[in-house]
Image (tube, grey):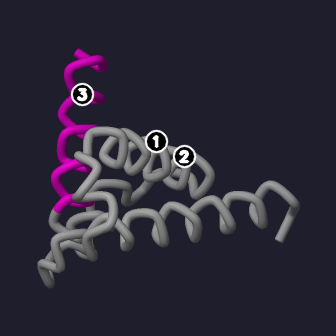
Amino acid sequence: LQREEGATRLLQLRQALQALLAGHPAGAEAVSKAVGGEPLEFALAQLAETLQASIRGLEAQALTAPAGRAAFRLLDEINRIRGAVAGGS
C-alpha cells in the first residue's frame, strides 16, 4: 500500500513539475501540494530526481527550448539550495 501511495505521489509530482515548466499558473501550487508536509531535504531530493528524469526524457530540440532551459535553471537552483541545506544554512 505504501508503494502504491509513493508511486501516486511521484506521478503527481512529475505532473506538477511538467505544469510548472510549461508555464501553467497552477504549476507552482501543484508542486507545493505534491511535496507539502515532507521534510525539506526529502522534498528537495524528490524535486531534483523528478526534474532530472524529466530532463533525460526530453528530445534534443526540447532541451534548448524555453521550457528545457527553465528545467535546467530550476534544477541548478534546487541543487544550490540542497547544498546550502546540507551545509547547515
Task: Estimate the spatial distance between the alpha carbons at disc 3 and disc 1, rounded to whole Å.
Answer: 14 Å
Q: Nearer the viewer, residue 46 or 55?
A: 55
Question: Where residue 14 appears, x then y in whole percent?
Answer: 24, 48
Classify the position of the N terminus by image quarter. Answer: top left
Q: Mark 3 points at which residue?
A: 7
**Disc 1 secondary structure class:** helix
Task: Estimate the spatial distance between the alpha carbons at disc 2 and disc 1, rounded to whole Å.
Answer: 6 Å
**Label 3 vs 1, first from the N-terminus:** 3
Amino acid type at mark 2: Ala
Instruction: Determine crowd level at label 1: few under 14, some 14-19, many 20+ residues with C-alpha closer than 10 A.
Output: some
Segment colored magenta:
1-18
**Label 2 vs 3, first from the N-terminus:** 3
**Disc 2 secondary structure class:** helix
Q: Name the residue under label 1.
A: 49
**Mark number for residue 45?**
2
User: In the rendered view, would you say 81 is above or below 35?
Assistant: below
Q: Is residue 49 magenta?
A: no
Q: Of helix, strand and loop, which mostly describes the magenta segment?
A: helix
Decide: marks 2, 1 in contact (CB < 8 A)? yes
User: In the rendered view, would you say 54 is above or below 34?
Assistant: above
Q: Residue at x 83, y 71 (%)?
A: 89
Question: Where residue 21 appears, x then y in whole percent?
Answer: 25, 69
Residue lying furthest front: 61
Instruction: Determine crowd level at label 2: few under 14, some 14-19, many 20+ residues with C-alpha closer than 10 A.
Output: some
